[in-house]
Image (cartoon, helix red, strand yellow):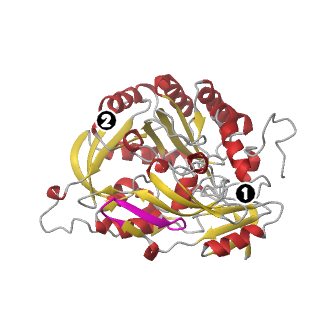
Amino acid sequence: MTRESLTGWGRTQPSVADVLEVTDSTDTAAAVAGAGPRGVLARGLGRSYGDAAQNGGGLVVRLQGLAGDVVIDALRAEATVPAGLSIDHLLRVIVPRGFFVPVTPGTRFVTIGGAIASDIHGKNHHADGSFGNHVTALDLLLADGSVLAIGPHNNPELFWTTVGGMGLTGVVLSATIRLIPIESSRMSVDTDRLPDLESLLAAMTDGDDNYRYSVGWVDLLAKGKHLGRSVLTRGDHAPAAQLAQREDALAYGPRQLVTVPSFAPPSGVLSHPAVAVFNELWYRKAPKHRVQELQSIATFFHPLDGVGAWNRLYGARGMVQYQFVVPMNRDDVLRRAVELLSAARVACFLAIIKRFGPGNPAPLSFPIPGWTLTLDASSAASGLPELFSALDTLVLDAGGRHYFAKDAHIGPEAVRRGYPRLAEWQTTRNAIDPQRKWQSDLARRLALLSEGPLDGLLGEGD
């Protein structure tokens, strides 16, 4: 066991905890039994942006996962996977066998347990939903040391409380997930350069249902008639027939091309002028319209994974990501949010719009049918708290919500407005952990474990 200062990928809000590497359910149960009053939390690869995978003053366990422990059922197109295994390692096992994960976020360096806890979504939510939709069973270590096998049809209430539950119901030890059969490790991609936000939303509304994957990059520094100018990228897994005859159809071996050094400038390199230049070049280099371009899985899904430690580009004070969703009929809120961000001139080179389909039964799952916008910014940017507060009002008044895995900003009241089923989640969670063994910095900041009125409870556990 070591004492470590932990942060999320945004490198903000550090806290110190005892960290223990565990290899099996016995070790994990023993660690949980010995946890002190600040409780225990499982942590994957630390790719949530805020404080979701931290437990200051308590215990954090890291569960190991080996690629050799993956069991593939090719006939059922399923895999049983250790929860500590990353999507990166899983892809290296399943892609050469002709399968792909059902959902992947913008990085492959997340664990299967983390994918379930955050109920991750990707470019295919409008078609396939979020990660929890594809989990058929999982083994959950409870606070009392017992292990339950649960699934959508086996103790469904606890299962859906665990999906999106941010690790606060127990430790996922393994999971069986459905896979997508593929003929190749290439993507067939259509790209469109669009002059404004209206054109992007119209194109996605009219055409997304023809594609499995869709995402729009937005230039948040553009103004006037170019407000929300975008690059829309859509596609699907390429059939083997689209590849050159001698090409190894299922070859897969993504590589890291470069690493950002730790001695990057303290203030970072993503200044407003630098991001303005990047955005201009990124927009101009995109074709006005191109169809069926072959891209690798890494290029299409995980382009930033080719740059090691890219979060260092934001400097010592780190970065924040802000992601919200609003209902489909409130695209006016999306437009107003883009206007506010453009007027504030916050330097964002990662600004993404996606279209969500129906949500799932998990009370704390983020996606609802609608539009989601994700953006990044240096935590040192001037006026950021005020800007985010203005966006909060827009989002919550429209019936929207924020994503816990990206959050480092909102407070308890925003959760209660955005997640009206919180009390339902708390009831199920507290029934299996009445002593509140499972804790986290995020849970304390957002008073997720506090039932009833918030008065007098917001500092509980601190």
Q: Which quarter shows the N terminus?
A: bottom right
Residue numbers of the magenta segment:
73-85
Specify the amino acid type for callout 2.
Asp
Q: Nearer the viewer, mark 2 or mark 1?
A: 1
SS class, disc 1: loop
Residue nearest the viewer, comparing 99 with 426: 426
Compared with residue 56, is residue 407 higher up or lower down, i.e. above or below?
above
Specify the amino acid type for callout 1.
Trp
> Is residue 296 magenta-colored?
no
Which residue corresponds to the image point at 34% horizontal and 70% vertical from the top-left? 253
| CB-based contact (under 8 Å), mark 2 and mark 1 | no
Q: Which residue is mark 1?
A: 438
Residue 254, visible in the rendered structure: no
Q: CA distance from mark 2 to mark 1?
A: 40 Å
Q: How many marks?
A: 2
How far from the left and from the top, in percent, is residue 21?
65, 74
Q: Which residue is mark 2?
A: 209
Quadrant in the rendering for residue 146 = bottom right
Residue 100, visible in the rendered structure: yes
Q: Which mark is residue 90?
A: none
Which residue corresponds to the image point at 72% horizontal and 73% vertical from the top-left? 30
* Label 1 environment density (alpha carbons within 10 Å; few <14, some 14–19, many ≥20): many
User: Of all residues shown, which one is farthest toward the left?
Assistant: 245
* Label 2 environment density (alpha carbons within 10 Å; few <14, some 14–19, many ≥20): few
Compared with residue 442, is residue 146 higher up or lower down, i.e. above or below?
below
SS class, disc 2: helix
> Is residue 75 magenta-colored?
yes
Which residue corresponds to the image point at 60% horizontal and 26% vertical from the top-left? 394
How far from the left and from the top, in percent, is residue 88?
44, 65
Report the side of 122 relative to 426 (left or right): left
Residue nearest the viewer, comparing 325 with 293: 325
Report the side of 397 relative to 197 (left or right): right
